[in-house]
Image (spheres, coloured by chain):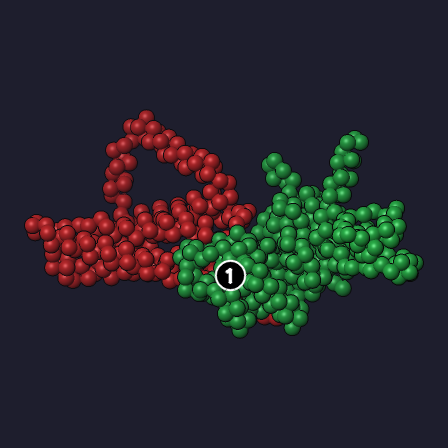
Chain colours: A red, B green
Amino acid sequence: MSTMSSLDRTVRVVRMQLINRQTYIWVPLLILGGSLALTIVIWTMIPYDGPKYGGASQAPLWYFFAVGIQALTLSFPFSQAMSVTRREFYLGTLLTALATSFILAAIFVFGGLLETATGGWGLNGYYFKLDWIWQQGPAAAGLFYLVAAMLFFVIGFTAATVYKRFGTLWLTIVLLAVAVLMVAAAWTITMTQSWPAVWTAVTTAGPLSAALWGLAVLVVLGVASFLVIRRATP
Amino acid sequence: MTAVIEVRGLTKRYRDAVAVDDVSFSIERDTIYGLLGRNGAGKTTVMSILTAQNFATSGDVRVFGEHPYENARVLSRMCFVRESQKYPDDATATHALGAARLFFPNWSQELADRLVDDFQLPMRRRIKKLSRGQLSAVGVIIGLASRAEVTFFDEPYLGLDAVARQLFYDRLLQDYTEHPRTVILSSHLIDEVSNLIERVLVIDRGRIIMNEDTDSVRDRAATIVGDSAAVDAFVAGREVLHRESLGRVASVTILGALTHEDRERLAAADLDVAPVSLQQLIVRTTQSADGAASEKGASR
């Protein structure tokens, strides 16, 4: 009987996730292409010659949030029927998200370079090349977008693992706890009168440090969701 | 015979109920088991724990001598598609069978293709749009074509009509003959699967109350048919499970194996012995187990 290594089975989880290419490839590309096309059409209607920026490039990111939720609620029970271990499912699914986030980031960087070369599609309009994200160059912008896409996915995935294992009540409690922590942080900042310092730090921080902070959050959520999924039932 | 699954003192407690209550049993290799019991008896819970899809509260489960939890070596040799199996959104049967092909080392595409034909499963329609019977067919095809060494079928027939169910039983037996493996089939259509299963595993209120060869279960009882006066004379003093009569002919099912003398008496009295319905026997046994349990409870 042939035996598969755990690595091989993890790679097969990636292939399982990509068997229906719609979820990870075609829909995000459609959202990206659609929102880009609509943005360009809108730009042609704006009689302003200065640089115009579109915020629609975040649309595929929100989709990744939804995919992160679905990857768990639907693909996890199916992976269990495929006799896949929880660890293999977790690693394979995050690897799939990483690969597709990478493709999105590459398109984003390529689009930004294209916008620079064409003077914003000849319209001085910028969908990909947002000044703040690009201030440290294309590599930093790409990393920022990669981390952002992964972060959206992992937030959705983590929330869904908590829901799957502990139910709606505990998901609500966890989300409330996060909100309480954020308010507590705001309160502390207000009490110590350090808002100006915080704002300076936030505005001077470039996309690179933002990406690194994002990476830290990613690691925390990644570890948390792994610990939760280890005891989840389909 | 060698055991592929060994369960010792397995208990699964939910907040307000005990689903599986200190159960011990083993499952032999290359045998078709019927896991029989009423709804809520604990059939699905037991199968979920054996495949590490669910967790035991206490007790020990060994499959191929190892713990199945997070154990790819063990899990890849098992297949358990639930009766209420969820599939990825927008997945079609093509996607589901394609995935199964990736993970089950003994997967037979040839068998899968033939079963798709047999069940006339629409391959390109999204699974969430399939009828209940077609949904069951997806699970049945994965279970059969995976040719896993241990395969669980959890009431696989929901929504399947009589013809499709017979098709499933036929294909299972046919493929089992060519590729022997352990099959655990949960069902409450007991008589329908009684010719298929070699061993009977009856679970009632979270306890295993029977784990025996189907034939020896059948031998535990007999149905005596013939002139009602002669039948009554023969069954006097024996435990009667079931009685039917039509005119002067009676058909009475009695508990207890027939001895050699019994058979001589039957032949002398011109009475016939007919096969017993497994369902009747099991229903009766679960009822008497319930009775014994409540008597025990009352005496406390």
Q: Residue furthest top?
A: A191
Q: Position of residue B186 (x, y in %)?
A: 63, 54
As helix, strand or loop, the secondary structure at mark 1 comes to helix
Q: Position of residue A52 (x, y in %)?
A: 14, 50
- Closest to the observer, B32 or B56: B32
In this picture, is B69 found above or below B121?
Answer: above
The location of residue A208, given as percent across then percent down, is 30, 50
Q: Residue at x 77, y 31 (%)?
A: B298
Q: Position of residue B30 (x, y in %)?
A: 69, 65
Reply above or below: A190 against B218.
above
Q: Residue at x 25, y 52 (%)?
A: A57
Query: Going by the picture, which residue comes out furthest to the front?
Result: B247
Tell me the residue that label 1 is attached to.
B138
Q: Amino acid at mark 1?
A: Val
Does residue A198 appear left or right of residue A157 in this picture?
A: left
Say if residue B111 shows up in the picture: yes
Question: What quarter of the picture does the N terminus of chain A occupy?
Answer: bottom right
